[in-house]
Structure formats: C-alpha cells, structure tokens
C-alpha cells in the first residue's frame, strides 16, 4: 500500500491533512475506508443512467436477502434511515400524508422511546414530524410503563442498540434502564404497533445484520459507512414489506420529506458491493487481526509505570478489540487529554479517544492499515514519556 502522504495527496492539495483514525468508525473523521472493489463498482455505475425507481427496488431485494428481512432499501446513512422509519410509520403510502410531512396534524404521530435511549440522532425522527414520547426514566423501565404509553396516536416504538445505550436487558445499578428488545417486541405486537430499530453501529459482529429482524423488529437500520465499509453517505434500511414500500414512497426521487436524503446510483451500487463483500468476509480473521494490533499497542506501553494497558472487547455492540490505557493514581505524566492532543498535533495527525469513568484512552484499530498500529504505538509511548 502507498504511504499516507501519497494516498493523502488529493487532500493535501486543498490544505487538508490525511490522518490516522484510531477512533473506530467515527463519522467526523471520515468513517471508514471503502474497499477498492466498492470504489471500482461505483466507477462502473457512473458510466450510464438508469430508472431510479427500478434500481431502488432491485437494490432492495439484495438488501432483503442479506438481512433476512421481507424487504429493504439503500438509504442515505442511518440518520436518513431514522427519518424514513418515522415517516413510513406515520404516513404509510398515503400520498396526501406523505406530501404533508413534517406537518403530522391528524396522523398517528407519536414515537415512544425509552428515556435511556434518548440520543443525539433522535432529531431525525422529529425532522419527519414525529413527537417523541419518553417511557421510563434513566434508571428503570417497567413493562407496564410501556403498555400505558401506547395509545391510538402511537406510530411506532423506537429502539436503539449500541455500545452507549442500555439495551438488550443490560442491568445497570441493579435495575433495567431499558426493556430488552424481545419484550418490547412482544408488547408492541399485542398492540399492533411497529418497532423501529437503530442498529447503526452494531457491525461487527456480522450476525447482528440479521439478528434484530429475526427477533421480529419491523424496521432496522445500519450505517453503510461504518462496519460495512461502503460509501459513508449510505445506509441499509430493512424490514416489513409494507413499511419499506412506505419508506421508498417518502424517499427520493419522490417529492417527499426524504428527497433531501438522496442516494445516487453510484452509492447504491457501492453499498451493495460492500454488503456482498461483508457477507463473504472471514470475520474471525478480522477479529484476530484487530486483536493483534491492539495487543501490539498494549505491549508497547506495558512497561510505562502508572499506566495499565489492556486489550478490551466490549459486549456484542462494540465488536472491535481495542487497546485501552488506564491512568493510575500514581501516574505523574501528562493527562489523557494531553496525550490525545499531542498525537493529534503530530505528523501525521493520529486521532484516538479519551474518556471513560476515570482518565483513560482507547485506540480502535478498525481503520488501521499495515504499519499504523506500530506508528501509533510509538507515538503513544513517546507522548506518555514526553519524548518527541
Ligand atoms: C452513527 C450512528 C447513527 C448515524 O449514522 P449515519 O450513517 O452517520 O447517518 C445513528 N445512530 C447510531 C446509534 C449511530 O451510531
């Protein structure tokens, strides 16, 4: 592989620096790198024009097969997927309602969401005109609380799955902030209300691509530019046939709320290629590879006194093994924040994360190419020891 300088030339021409991205698939730093096959398929898709309705439907069939859902479509990232989920559940395929959004007067327009699941992306539901109704409190939610909140105004129940959310029955402080998804699905089914799932960042592990649909979720979204390594501006939306039809009706090329979240034909083809590659991948080998890179970083700082470095792999929702550095009480060197800043200011800039309950740093090798882990390990060691 070419050096980062060479690969980044098109950006440095603009005065933008190429970076080493050790923060997982964070959108702000470019998400992920597409596979060359993905880019190649996009170039091919750019050579002619097609009927977009036809492409949307045929692409949806591929998404459906990959996810095990009845139907699917390619959307413009998970945030657009949330918007379309909300719109679909409120309007169905009624053209009058679709044209009226985000004005939802007279429609079923409430989306129930666990208080513990409120997050920075839920504006996407509101952008469609939905009104959020919170269930439970940050510490505990009981089944009867959800039952009580379901009314004739309920359009859907939203459920967020990710490393930062209490879900799948995660117990915190001796209680359950959110009901487990299967329980939500059971309650929703009894009331005839769809459950819309945000699983944007749950790949890897690969089996999450089918898991929530198999459990009975009505619609599920995944980001195309995170674990799947497709175009960053894409997402996978899958679910029940009538709801996907409604989502497509609310999306481009129609004059609808989703028109502003258009996906072009090159991106659709790119995402399908990424999806195909993902299904064929040796995920065990990826895991071993990431673990080895995280271990290399841990080993490089193992001797630094006052720092406890370990490889950690969080639960199912944060599948990539990471190098985590905990700053001990006896640590006298620079703070985690200072170390992170030092790495960003170096050449090339290295982006890693700081945070957690105490001072800690974590490095996610998801985006590393050959040589990156070694470079990051050296830079980290130097920053901790304040050399270079
Ligand atoms: C990343 C993320 C999104 C937004 O995804 P995009 O594809 O960037 O639009 C939404 N929800 C969750 C939980 C995410 O992690």
Image: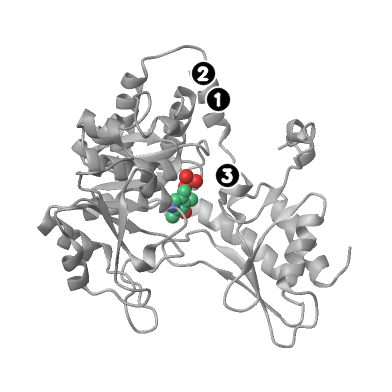
| Direction left: furthest residue | 190
Label pair 1/2, CB-CB below 8 angstroms: yes
Q: CA distance from mark 1 to mark 2?
A: 6 Å
The numbered disc on residue 32 is 3
The residue closer to the viewer here, 178 or 44, is 178
**Residue found 71% across the figure and 37% down from its top:** 1
Side of 29 where 171 appears, left or right: left
Figure check: 155 above or below 266: below
Which quadrant would the C terminus be assigned to in this image? Answer: bottom right
In the rendered image, residue 363, in percent from the top left (x then y), is placed at: 64, 62
Figure check: 186 above or below 306: above
Which residue in the protein does label 2 denote?
Answer: 44
Figure check: 353 above or below 31: below
User: Callout 1 environment at 10 Å: few (<14), some (14 to 19), or many (20+)?
Assistant: some
Which residue in the protein does label 1 denote?
Answer: 40
**Residue found 52% across the figure and 35% down from its top:** 231
**Residue found 42% across the figure and 32% down from its top:** 272
Label 3 element class: loop
In the rendered image, residue 317, in percent from the top left (x then y), is placed at: 43, 61
* Circle 3 or circle 1, nearest the eye: 3
Label 1 element class: helix
Label pair 3/2, CB-CB below 8 angstroms: no
Q: CA distance from mark 3 to mark 1?
A: 16 Å
């Amino acid at each position: 592989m070419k050096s980062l300088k060479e690969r980044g030339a098109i950006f440095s021409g603009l005065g933008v620096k190429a970076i080493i991205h050790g923060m997982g698939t964070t959108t702000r730093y470019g998400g992920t790198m597409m596979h060359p096959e993905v880019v190649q398929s996009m170039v091919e898709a750019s050579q002619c024009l097609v009927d977009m309705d036809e492409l949307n439907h045929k692409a949806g069939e591929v998404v459906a097969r990959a996810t095990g859902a009845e139907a699917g479509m390619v959307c413009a990232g998970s945030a657009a997927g949330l918007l379309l989920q909300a719109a679909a559940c409120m309007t169905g395929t009624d053209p009058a309602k679709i044209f009226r959004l985000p004005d939802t007067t007279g429609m079923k327009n409430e989306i129930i969401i666990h208080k513990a699941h409120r997050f920075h992306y839920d504006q996407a539901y509101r952008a469609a005109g939905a009104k959020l109704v919170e269930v439970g409190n940050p510490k505990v939610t009981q089944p009867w609380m959800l039952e009580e909140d379901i009314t004739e105004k309920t359009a859907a129940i939203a459920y967020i799955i990710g490393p930062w959310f209490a879900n799948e029955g995660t117990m915190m402080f001796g209680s359950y902030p959110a009901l487990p998804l299967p329980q939500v699905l059971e309650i929703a089914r009894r009331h005839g209300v769809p459950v819309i799932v945000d699983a944007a960042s749950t790949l890897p592990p690969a089996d999450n691509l089918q898991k929530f649909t198999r459990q009975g979720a009505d619609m599920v979204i995944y980001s195309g530019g995170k674990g799947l390594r497709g175009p960053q501006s894409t997402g996978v939306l899958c679910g029940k046939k009538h709801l996907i039809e409604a989502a497509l009706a609310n999306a481009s090329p129609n004059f609808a709320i989703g028109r502003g979240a258009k996906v072009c034909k090159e991106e659709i083809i790119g995402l399908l290629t990424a999806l195909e590659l993902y299904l064929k991948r040796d995920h065990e080998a990826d895991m071993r590879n990431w673990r080895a890179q995280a271990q290399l970083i841990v080993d490089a700082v193992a001797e630094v006194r006052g720092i406890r470095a370990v490889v950690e792999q969080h639960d199912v929702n944060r599948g990539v093994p990471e190098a985590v550095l905990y700053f001990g009480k006896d640590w006298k060197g620079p703070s985690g924040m200072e170390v992170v800043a030092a790495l960003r200011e170096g050449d090339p800039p290295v982006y890693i994360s700081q945070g957690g309950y105490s001072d800690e740093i974590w490095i996610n090798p998801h985006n590393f190419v050959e040589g990156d882990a070694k470079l990051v390990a050296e830079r980290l060691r130097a920053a901790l020891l304040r050399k270079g």
